[in-house]
Image (cartoon, rainbow, N blue to C red):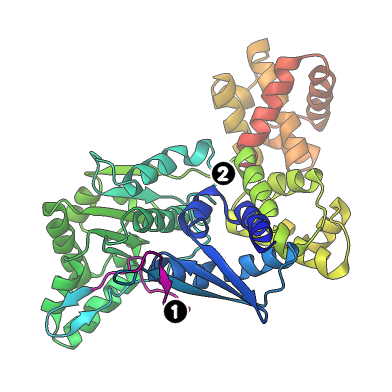
Amino acid sequence: MTNAVWGNVRNKIKEQVGDHNFITWIAPLELSAVEDGVAHLTAPTNFIANWVNRNFADPMLRAMGAAGMPAQRIEIAVQVRAPGAAAPVAQQPAPAPAPPSYIAPTRAAAPGKGDDELPAAPLDARFTFDNFVVGKPNALAHAAARRVAEGAAVSFNPLFLYGGVGLGKTHLMHAIAWEIQSRNPEARVMYLSAEQFMYRFVQALRDRQTLDFKSLFRSVDILMVDDVQFIAGKESTQEEFFHTFNALIDQNKQIIISADRAPGEIKDLEERIKSRLQSGLVVDLHPTDYELRLGILQQKAEMNRANYGDVAINSDVLEFLAHRITNNVRVLEGALTRLLALASLLGRDITLDMTQDCLADILRSSERKVTVEEIQRKVAEHYNIRLSDMIGPKRLRTIARPRQVAMYLSKQMTTRSLPDIGRRFGGRDHTTILHGVRKVEELRASDSQLAEDLELLRRLLES
C-alpha cells in the first residue's frame, strides 16, 4: 500500500516541479517508512538530501497529504554501502542547511584564511530553465544561456545579457548557475552582483587582503556578475574587475555578465572594459510581446494551483492582464499572485470585474501613455511614407489612407480631443479627423488587410 501511495505522491510532485527537477532531485529518493507522522526517505548523496530538504519539502508534504499519506514532516537519510554489505544502509537524516550563498557545493581556499566559502549571492530556486517561458523577444538569450549552461564548447566568452527591468536577465543568470551545478556538482560557480564585487574589493583593501581577494576570485570555474553597470565610475573597482576578467579569460574560464543596457551605452565605464565585454556574445532581451506575457501568466497560474487550491481563473482574465500590464514581468506576476490570494481568501472564482477592482492601482500605473506623435511615426514607418507627408496637405490615396489610420488610432489610444488631434495633423479641422475615424471603422469590417494592419500597429504601440 505504501509503495502505491508513494507512486501517486511522486506523480503529483512531478506535476508541480516539472520533469527536469523531478528527474534530478525527486526520482533518486526512496520511501522506507511512514511512522508517527514522519515520512522516512533515503537519498543516494548528502547533497541531494540537503537540496530536497531545502527546496522541495513543502511541495512533497502537500502531495503526500493529497495522496492520503499522513506525514507532517520528512526526514531524508543518505544511503551508504557498508564494507562487505550487500545492501545500502542509512546514515542519520541529513539536516536541512541554511540557504547557500553560492551554487557550487565546493569551497575555494583563500590563502591565509583556510577553507572559505566563495563570497556570493543566494540563488532563487524558482529561477530555473524549466520555469523560464521562451518567446520571440528572449529566444536568442535563452538559447545562448542554455548553450553555456550545458557546458558545450562555445565560441563566445563572455556572454553578455542586457535588457530593462523585469525582462528575465536575473532569471537566466540563476538558471545557468543551477544547470551547471546539476550537470557538474564539482564546478566552482560564483554568482554575485557588481555591488557585491565592489564591496568585497573595498573590504579587501581596508583589511589589506587584496592578494586573498585576487586568489579567491580567480580560482573559480565560472564567474557570473549581475548588473555590471554599477561599477561604472568606480575607478579602482573597474581596475580590479578588468584584471580578474583577463585572468579568467586567459584560463579559458567562462564569464557571464548582465546589465540594463549594452556595454557601449554604459556611461563612465572604461573603454577597455567595454571592449572586453563586447568581444563575446552580446544579447538583448527585448520587451515582452503579448504572446510571451500570456504564456508567463498561464505557466504561473498552473504552478500556483497547489498553493491556492481550486481557485478558477478564466482565460479572459489572463488575456486581459497580458494586454494591460506590458512594462514589467515582475509586476505582471505580482498582479496574478494578488488575484489568486484574494480569491482563495474570499472563496471566490476570479472574474474580470474582480480583477479590475483588485488591481485598480496596478492597472492605472501600467497604462501605456501613447502619444499622437508616436502613433504618426509608427504608422509612417509601417506604410513606408514620410512623416512630413502624413501631416502635410497631400491627398494621394497612398498617403491619405495611412493618415486616416493614424487618426483612428489617435482617437482610440489617446485621451486627446478631436480638435487637439486635428492640430497635430497639420491644423486640420475636427470634422476631418472624425471623417477619417469613421472611414477606418467602416473599412475594417470588410478589409481584412486593414484589420491586420490596425491590430499589428496597436500591438507595436502597446509593447
Residue 97: give its label: 1
Above or below: residue 234 compared with residue 313: below
Q: Residue at x 73, y 62 (%)?
A: 67
Q: Are marks 1 and 2 in contact (CB under 8 Å)?
A: no
Q: How far, Cα to Cα, is label 1 from label 2?
A: 37 Å
Residue holding disc 2: 288
Find the magenta span and give its range: 85-107
Residue visible at 29% across and 78% down in the picture: 199
Circle 1 sits in a helix, a strand or a loop, which is it?
A: loop
Is disc 1 surrounded by few (<14), some (14 to 19) or many (20+) residues within 10 Å?
A: few
Indicate left or right for 273 with 159 as reference.
Answer: left
Q: Is residue 373 visible?
A: no
Answer with the quarter of the image where residue 84 lies. bottom left
The quadrant the N terminus occupies is bottom right
Element on which disc 2 rests: loop
Q: Residue 257 is drawn in which quadrant?
A: bottom left
Q: Left or right of 64: which side holds 272?
A: left
Where's the C terminus, which quadrant? top right
Q: Is residue 201 left or right of residue 2?
A: left
Q: Position of residue 320 (x, y in %)?
A: 76, 46
Residue 441 at x, y = what percent?
83, 24
The main secondary structure of the magenta stretch is: loop
Magenta span contains residue 96: yes
43 is within the stretch colored magenta: no
In the rendered image, residue 284, in percent from the top left (x then y), is placed at 41, 43
- 302 versus 194 height, above or below: above
Q: Nearer the viewer, residue 224 or 378?
A: 224
